Image (cartoon, helix red, strand yellow):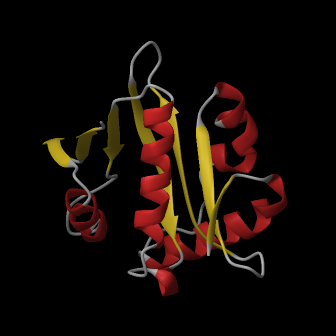
Amino acid sequence: MTIIPYDDRHKDRMLAMISEARMALGLTPEVRADLYDVKANYLDKGDMFWLAVEEDGSVIGCLGYSRIGGSDEAFLHRFYIKASRKRQGIGTALLQTAESAMISRGITVSRVHLGGPREQWFESYAFYPKNGYAEYEPRYMVKYLS
């Protein structure tokens, strides 16, 4: 497995992986509109987006961030791991890649919105604190990067 910056060559495989990951969580398979054009919605704005890719080109995870305008903060977005590949360090590798890139770009605060109730998003509520994030209001977590 390799973490790479987003590349349109992997778009269809990424969208299929996200749809599958959402269904495994009991959600609709719908993919958010911003993911149909990662280049315009992330990269062209100076933000970043990564893919976890296997040697055969299959996409097994993704994560992006968007800087909060005029600040040294960013929000993490669209963090998905293929259901059959969870708990294998892929999410941690993607998160560490994103945090390192944020630090190198002068971002000192990473925020995340967890999307829904704790019962539905129990994996996120366990994962982020394990990686240094703390809840600062319901469904929102923050980490101060160094």
Q: Decide if residue 139 is on the left or right side of residue 12.
A: left
Does residue 135 appear in the picture of this structure?
yes
Q: Tell me where residue 126 sits by quadrant.
A: bottom left
- Percent x, y of residue 123: 29, 70
Could you tell me which residue is drawn at 69 percent across and 71 percent down? Answer: 16
- Percent x, y of residue 21: 52, 73
Residue lying farthest to the bottom in this orientation: 84
Considering only vertical position in the picture, is 68 above or below 137?
above
Does residue 137 appear in the picture of this structure?
no
Q: Decide if residue 30 is on the left or right side of residue 58.
A: left
Residue lying farthest to the right in this orientation: 9
**Which image quarter holds the N terminus?**
bottom right
Could you tell me which residue is drawn at 72 percent across and 77 percent down? Answer: 58
- Percent x, y of residue 10: 78, 63
Considering only vertical position in the picture, is 127 above or below 23?
above
Q: Decide if residue 50 is on the left or right side of residue 100.
A: right
Residue lying farthest to the top in this orientation: 70
Could you tell me which residue is drawn at 33 percent across and 45 percent down? Answer: 113
Front residue (pair 10, 107): 107
Considering only vertical position in the picture, is 121 above or below 25?
above
Q: Tell me where residue 41 sits by quadrant.
A: top right
**Which image quarter holds the C terminus?**
top left
Count of marks placed on residues: 0
Q: Decide if residue 26 is on the left or right side of residue 134.
A: right
